[in-house]
Image: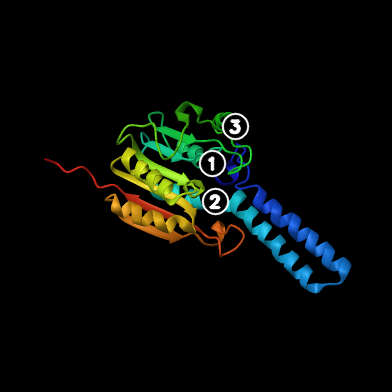
Amino acid sequence: MGETRKGEYGFDAPYVPLGYAVGGTVLVVGGVFLGVLGLVLVGIVLLLCAGVFLHATRRGKFQIWENALDELKLEPDARVLDLGCGRGAVLLAAAQRLGAGGRAVGIDLWRTVDQSGNALETTRRNAVAEGVADRVELHTGDLTELPFADGSFDVVVSSLAIHNIDAEIGRTTAIREAVRVLAPGGRIVFVDLRIAAEYVDVLGERGMTDIVDRDEGVNGWWSGPWMPTRRVTARKPAARRL
């Protein structure tokens, strides 16, 4: 992952930093022209927000997932599912840690409002660029109704995707689906905005164990500390022996 990335991964919520940058520039220029210091200061804050957001989308989230995937210590033959895989930043980084017998499966609705240039073909090209196309599988589908059998995956991950489901009942359903397709003993890693706190409750209700919710700090600030990134991890209990 890191600086060796060969694919093109775009920008998360691209209109947000653009709005900060345009608004900040207009206020700074207008404030200077009108001689209003307050406008200049507000404009500078907005430009700083744009810079912090760009750091999170272009560098910070990659470092967060570098750490998360290192901690997972994926087995070479692991089956990994990425919910809302987008252009494949996490999916392909996971695939790079797998052997020939492993499989990294991504599913998405491919909406460009959530990520610039988000498209199945873009992710497929990135898989080729990263040298992992032979162990990557892509699907178009809804996270609330996954087209996979129970217990199909050893690891389920999701990066900044579940919060895009507007209704809480939809997010809850997506998390339940993630647990359903996870094999006994398997692990979940959700990296998302502060709304991730609600995921903890759902995972607990579904019988998951070793649930941890952590703040990822400045690498995950989406404009500032008021919009942090959280990493939620959990494990599905192993099947009981009869």
Kindly identify the residue that appears in the image at 57 percent across and 53 percent down.
60
Task: Locate residue 108 relative to residue 11 in the image: left or right.
Answer: left
Residue picked out by circle 1: 89
Which three-letter amino acid code belongs to the residue tagged 1?
Answer: Ala
Location of residue 6 in the rendering, given as x and y in whole percent from the top left corner: 60, 37
> Which quadrant would residue 239 be assigned to in this image?
top left
Residue picked out by circle 3: 122
Q: Residue furthest right?
A: 33
> Which quadrant would residue 181 be assigned to in this image?
top left
**Secondary structure category for the residue under label 2:** helix
- Cα distance between the residues tagged 2 and 1: 9 Å
- Cα distance between the residues tagged 3 and 1: 11 Å
Residue picked out by circle 2: 61
For marks 3 and 1 on the same chain, the one whose residue lies earlier in the sequence: 1
- Cα distance between the residues tagged 3 and 2: 19 Å
Q: Nearer the viewer, mark 3 or mark 2?
A: 3
